[in-house]
Amino acid sequence: MRPSLAAMEAQCHSQADKLTLPLLLQRNAAEYADAPALTAGDKTLTWAELRERTASLARGLGTLGLKRGERMMIMMSLRPEHWLIDYAAAHLAAISCTAYQTLSTEQVGYVARHSGATVVVLEGADEVSRWLPVLGTLKALKRVIVLDASAIPAGDSRFVSFAEVEADGRVLHQKNPSLFEDGWKGIRPDDAISMIYTSGTTGDPKGVVLSHRNVFYEAIAVDLAAPVPMRVASVAYLPLAHIGERELGLYRALYKALHVHICTDPVGVVPLLARSRAPAFFGVPRLWEKLAAGLRVKMDALEPQKREPILAAHAVAMEAFRLRGSGKQVPEELQQKVEVAEARVLKPLRQSMGLDALQWASSGSAPIPVDILEYLGGFGLEILEVWGMSETTGCATINMPGDFRVGAVGRTIPGVEIRLAEDGEIFVRGPIVFLGYLSAEGDIVSATDADGWLATGDIGTVDADGFLSITDRKKELLITSHGKNIAPSKIEGMLRAHPLVGQAMAIGDMRPYVTALISLDPEAAPLWAKARGVVANTLAELIEAPVVRAELESLVAATNARLSRAEQVKRFHVVSEAWSPATDEITLTLKLKRRVILERYSERIASLYANA
């Protein structure tokens, strides 16, 4: 029986009031010394090994001059060394911050200078080449650590290799381990632990400073809402610059002593999830959209005698999912049909995909179309939305297995409150609200009002059962020249639900009607077209295929049929490029960089409004 909300809140506070990262790492190394902690490829670190290497790196960082409250910037891919150096900084009460690897030199300069970083940790030659031009502008910089020693510029005394820092620290730690052990014991739950730079979709990124209490309260509360056993598998695949991965991969992993499997290639996420048998997984919407697109393509490719039983089982399960997702009871007759479909078709299908161990799958960071949730729900893959932001240490609301609403982002986690302003903006209060933004002067400036409420910038509604729904970002609302407020994410989500579409952006701010730019999915679109007899070497060729153009016309028409007149897409253009973080149209968390897209396609957008 699930404890009451008040009991869960009390449990969260009682634990979070005592926990720090060093304390949990000490516990795991003592109680689960030989248990696996991190696996990357064929290499695994146990909890004892992880802590021993963390201790060496902490001593090494100390000799470089990293001190309490100072910021350490990291630009490194997902690899064990990222966990090690991050945990090491926390033992010195320093504030670690990961920068996205896709940042340009100009963007690197902004976050590096704003952070006031004293130590910078880079992976290799590519990162060094982008940081080198800005290092001279960092007044507080003490040293630059590089994982790949061959990438260190010859004769530049500012640089030191990762291996050298660890080796020097190991010698010091072996000589006098008490200095490390005594050093971290002064760290308190309210001390800062890390900083996240917001993705900057509409302006300069801000440095969001989080405390030990923030990150471990979040871990405890989420685990009470959707519990997993101690020491089970977990998959890390998002950059550690993303609050979701930082919270789950770094901090919840510590709290539950999870075995983190590191995925270095996003294409391999689902296969790794299958191999690791992880019971819980957080995915950004695009991952679930691509999974759904892949399933649709596979269903299309099956022979009718194999496809029809699956589609019949899928229809039954989806009907039941819709009922549960609207808070209604599933009739006994339908439930019996679901059980038969599950035993004969759906469970074996999930087993063949390696996803039968998945008990709690969640989606967040951006809206996900209801169509996608329902389609996957028909296969027994219940994807439950959560909502939050870097400033709330990850999710503030959560849908729970057996208690969810499709299209909503759940109820608040224990100890967190929300309220809506007159314009629908969501305000949040509670122990997961961050310490504040880092100022250019190095101070941490609170962003809450006198009563502790944080304005999120998201617009939403709350139903009679307390489930929150997000309608849009306050800053991203389109206001047409006729004064109509349009939520672009709603339109974009409907368009993205089709396997042909990789990304879509609705346009219409201060314009007479809504238009859209559509970018094809570079993986799913060719497969969809091939199943219909169209083979193309490039996306540009694919766009010209009549069957593709006709399908996109039908998609826009079907989308418009579900929208109000003001929201309907009057004209659209299919771009010949695939949008990606590498080409800067979207962030690494797959959010649209609207300002970049508007500038890049300004002439094409203008043509959509010709003769308007």
Image (cartoon, grey):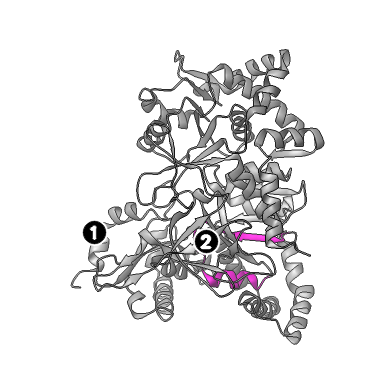
* Horizontal and vertical percent position of residue 122: 51, 29
Task: Give, as a three-letter code, the residue at label 1.
Answer: Glu
Q: Is residue 41 visible?
A: no
Query: Reading the chain from its start, which is encountered first: label 1 or label 2?
Result: 2
**Vertical relation: 196 (above or below) 182:** below
**Vertical relation: 505 (above or below) 439:** below
Task: Give, as a three-letter code, the residue at label 2.
Answer: Ile
Which residue matches tag 1?
603
In this orientation, which residue lies closer to the viewer: 529 or 437? Answer: 437
302 lies left or right of 233? left
Residue at far bottom of view = 333
At 58% from the left edge and 49% from the top edge, which residue is drawn? 431
Residue range (magenta):
358-379
* Horizontal and vertical percent position of residue 514: 31, 71
Q: Is residue 292 visible?
A: yes
Residue at far front of view = 450
Which residue matches tag 2?
418
In this orientation, which residue lies closer to the viewer: 397 or 202? Answer: 397
Q: Is residue 372 magenta?
A: yes
83 lies left or right of 480? right
In this orientation, which residue lies closer to the viewer: 296 or 367? Answer: 367
**Mark 2 element type:** strand
**Vertical relation: 514 (above or below) 88:** below
Residue at far left of view = 611
* Horizontal and vertical percent position of residue 583: 40, 48
Q: Is residue 378 magenta?
A: yes
**Mark 1 element type:** helix
